[in-house]
Amino acid sequence: MPGSGCENLFVLRGVAPAGNVSTSGVMGTQNMEIAMTRLRAGLLVVVVAALATGMATARVAWGGSVKGAVILKGAAPEPRKLPVTIDQYVCGKEKSAEDLVLSPEGGIRNAVVWLENPPPTPAAAAPPPVTAMDQKDCVFTPRVVVVAAGGRIDFLNSDRLLHNLHSTPSANPPFNRAQPKGRTIPIAFPHPEIVRVSCDLHSWMRGWVVVAPHPFYTVTDAAGRFALPGLPPGRYTVRAWQERLGTISREIVVGDQDPTPVTLEMTAR
């Protein structure tokens, strides 16, 4: 191990040269001290190098974040009711069209917000967590879910009647599965895209699976609010999608401490 000091340990195993017998005790002691000093120095270098490597590979917990809301710009459209002509004993006689749900202040529920240019993130050590979407009272709930690419949705049926799951994605495998009461159907989504799911037996039923290529995706709450934490400082493009209003984007600059406030305005169509 050149340069580490370990080569001097061989002095301890050597034999004093002929003619130097009278000084072998002194020379042996000196050589031992030199060897131990160099050994300590070599071990210190190894420890420091190991610590440096560990710090270089550890994930930094960034303190930047984006926090804001997606709101409707302009007058809100009139709420729509959809007639129910089948299975009224479970589904009722009409359903609200949930393709645009607003708070009293105009916040848009179930909009998806993400970073178009996310920071690098290490590969996940474990499979993505399983997400669930239920069919309850003849609606998909939640209506919009986000799942990591390669993850799985467990589709449930809590109604006491037959539903089905039908989707024709462009990047992921299509499916059309009958689903009686109480049956769970797991479906994997390997590729990023926005997938519409419907029930052919109940035409008003719609659900959306957003297959995300990175962790910086979220869905707005009932007030239209969202948060994207854990960001390094920098310039980003924030995008928002809503099933009826389409997609918008905005450029922002994120600092390293206080949340960056963002309001995303979408126009009614």
Image (cartoon, rainbow, N blue to C red):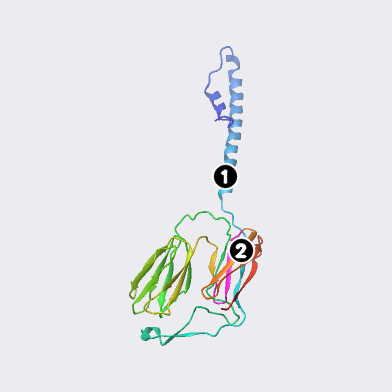
Q: Is residue 148 left or right of residue 90?
A: right
Q: Residue 37 occupies which quadrant of the picture?
A: top right
Circle 1 packing at 10 Å, graded few (<14), some (14-19), many (20+), is few
What residue appears at the point 52 percent right and 23 percent down from the top-left corner?
13
Q: Is residue 179 left or right of residue 266?
A: left
- Give the mark, 2 or 1, whose residue is nearer the N terminus: 1
Q: Position of residue 90 (x, y in %)?
A: 37, 84
Q: Secondary structure at mark 1?
A: helix
Q: Nearer the viewer, residue 244 or 65?
A: 244
Give, as a three-letter code, the residue at label 1.
Thr
Looking at the rendered image, the disc whose residue lies closer to the viewer, 2 or 1, is: 2
The image's mark for residue 237 is 2
Circle 2 packing at 10 Å, graded few (<14), some (14-19), many (20+), is some
Q: Residue 228 lies in magenta, yes or no?
A: yes
Looking at the rendering, the stretch of residues picked out in magenta corresponds to: 220-231
Q: Return the residue at label 1.
A: 53
- From this view, report whether residue 12 is shown above or below residue 146: above
Q: Quadrant of the C terminus?
A: bottom right
Q: Position of residue 240 (x, y in %)?
A: 57, 69
Confirm whether residue 183 shows in the render.
no
